[in-house]
Amino acid sequence: MWRIPGSGAPPSGVAPGVTLAPAVERVPTRAWVVWAVGLTAYVVAVFSRASLGVAGVQAQERFDAGASALSLFVVLQLVVYAGLQVPVGLALDRLGSRRMLVLGALTMAAGQLVLALATSVPQAVAARVLVGAGDAMTFISVLRIVSLWFPGRTVPVMTQLTGILGQSGQVLAAYPLVTLLAAAGWGPTFTGAAAVGVLVTVLVGVALRDAPPHVVLAPAAGLAQVRHDLRATWREPGTRLGLWTHTVTQFSGTVFVLLWGFPFLVVGQGLSPQRAAGLMTLLVIVGMLVGPLLGQLVGRWPLRRSVLVLTVVGATALTWTAVLAWPGRAPMPLLVLLVLVLGTNGPASMIGFDYARTENPAARLGSASGVVNVGGFVASLVTMLGVGLVLDALTPGSSADYALGSFKAAFTVQYVVWVLGAVQVWRYRRRMRERLATGGVVLAPLHLAVAARLRRTSAYR
């Protein structure tokens, strides 16, 4: 950054209302313990979220349901998750992380118990609604713990680690749960999953605290204050920048992993199921490796976060364009490149939560994170639906009949979200930079800032 002559030296180059990460401080041992407890709750939430997916064959037999009914479970669960983000965020600001994590774990445990006893599709749907509701309360509650317990500059890295390590819940669902299903059957397996949720409830209630002892949290706000805070959260350009960051970065990778990636690779591109599964695994591994790196970059360049966002979006759109424009089936190296790029989508979406954290006071962290978290999931649901509608329109019949050309046409619906999201990111980035300029801080061109950082000078940022 550079200083406007005569404007004075703003501390750390910060305009009014903008919070930058302080220098790295020592993280107390208790912070790690509290985070580990919250992370455990999130791992169990991911496990609960993924548990029905890995039991799909048994679910079809138990409920006498077709593939469309199982897809309804997934979509409905995501709808509940996304729809509850703002209400959960408001409740989080009032009740704190500890209570919300307890409530979330109990709700998911109830959902797993209902699923264990369910014998019909409506009962199973009710069970997944409960799981989706409990899941909605978990992630942003853990993010609030990270923001309150860890020094500012370490928060982006810890946020990435939380998201990455939380995905180990999918591993627990894929291996131990499947093994237990084969050995013990449906009822005992999901009753055991419910018992795990109860154990997490006890662990959170005993060992987790909302904030360090020296941090004094504001008392719970009344309903009038809640409405005022929500309006203030929404009016904050940083919140909207976080929302659109999450929207434009997360959806493509999520759609690929949750629904349409495997059919595209196997039916459209002609890969064997084993090769397709290998590519999906590679996508997850890339996300685990890229996440901490992006967290470090965000901590070191807090005023350049949008550059990372737009870079990931541009790389994703460009790689998809190469795959879709390739005549016939894409070569394997190009598909590997696509998966590598999609692996960056999830970590990049976490930058949206960093905007929510730095641009809102602590009393609004929950509602701001909730607003941000809506974006990617709504975009994912809309894109999943759009891809499905185009496929059905072009290739009536079963999924085995989908042609490669139909897949290519269907995946072009992503461009609508990319264009809209990129425009909105650019728009709200400009608003934030105008606010910085009002405080006397004007960002230099990126190449000058990078050159200055390489020379270890502080002339530009």
Image: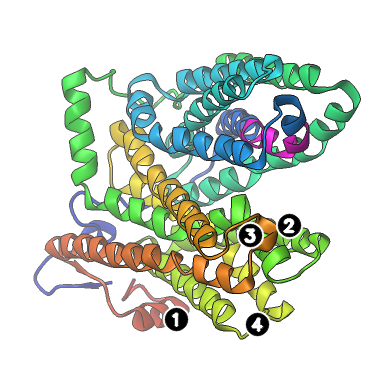
In the picture, the disc for residue 324 is none
Q: Earlier in the sequence, mark 2 or mark 3?
A: 3
Q: Can you identify the residue that label 1 sits on?
A: 455
> Left of 107 or right of it: where is 118?
right
Q: Disc 1 marks which amino acid?
A: Arg
Residue at 28% x, 18% y is 219
Q: Can you identify the residue that label 3 sits on?
A: 261
Q: Quadrant of residue 438?
A: bottom left
Residue at 35% x, 52% y is 242
Cα distance between the residues tagged 1 and 3: 44 Å
User: Mark 1 against mark 2, which lies toward the viewer?
Assistant: 2
User: Height in image: 108 above or below 278?
Assistant: above
User: Height in image: 457 above or below 297?
Assistant: below
In which quadrant of the rendered image does the C terminus lie? bottom left
Residue 122 is at least partly visible in this image:
yes
Residue sitting nearer the eye, 458 or 364: 364
User: Height in image: 144 above or below 328?
Assistant: above
Q: Can you identify the residue that label 4 sits on?
A: 328
Q: Earlier in the sequence, mark 1 or mark 4?
A: 4
Q: Which residues are magenta?
A: 46-58
Q: Earlier in the sequence, mark 2 or mark 4?
A: 2
Residue at 16% x, 64% y is 434
Residue 444: horizontal and vertical position, in percent?
A: 27, 77
Residue 258: horizontal and vertical position, in percent?
A: 60, 50
User: Mark 2 against mark 3, which lies toward the viewer?
Assistant: 3
| Residue at disc 3, secondary structure | helix
Q: Residues within 10 Å of mark 1 (few under 14, many from 20)?
A: few
Residue sitting nearer the eye, 262 or 84: 262
Residue 333: horizontal and vertical position, in percent?
A: 71, 79
